[in-house]
Amino acid sequence: MANPIYGSGPLRSREGLISRPAASSDEIQLRIDPMHTDLEEEISGIHNKKKFRALEMKGVGQEIETEAKFQNGIISQLYYREEAG
């Protein structure tokens, strides 16, 4: 098939994507074939994984903050005991 970037017609790939020339020569339009909706599901799954990972990382950050405060408290107590000692 001809190259759609140069305005010579649509190109259909095996994955079900169709590329058509747009009004401007430096733009292209891309349409996903409705027979291949797995891409939308894949994108949605990736988005959900990203949200889950962000929540996990927030939890890890909170754990680190809690541990740092705890250790800082222990160090402060030891320091003051040494000063009073």
Image: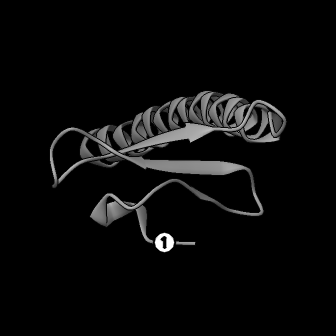
Q: Residue at x 56, y 33 (%)?
A: 54
Horizontal arrangement in the rendering, residue 24 relative to residue 33 (left or right): left
Q: Residue at x 55, y 37 (%)?
A: 31
Horizontal arrangement in the rendering, residue 35 relative to residue 39 (left or right): right
Give the quadrant of the N terminus: bottom right
Q: Amino acid at mark 1?
A: Ala
- Structure colour scheme: one colour
Which x, y percent locates residue 72?
39, 40
Image height of 20 relative to 58, above or below: below
Q: Residue at x 61, y 37 (%)?
A: 50
Residues packed near mark 1 inside 10 Å, few (<14), some (14 to 19) or many (20 plus): few
In terms of secondary structure, where does tag 1 sit? loop
Comparing 16 with 9, the one in front is 9
Q: Residue at x 84, y 35 (%)?
A: 35
Comparing 36 with 45, the one in front is 36
Image height of 66 relative to 72, above or below: above
Quarter of the figure with residue 85: top left
Horizontal arrangement in the rendering, residue 71 relative to residue 60 (left or right): left
Which x, y percent locates residue 84?
28, 38
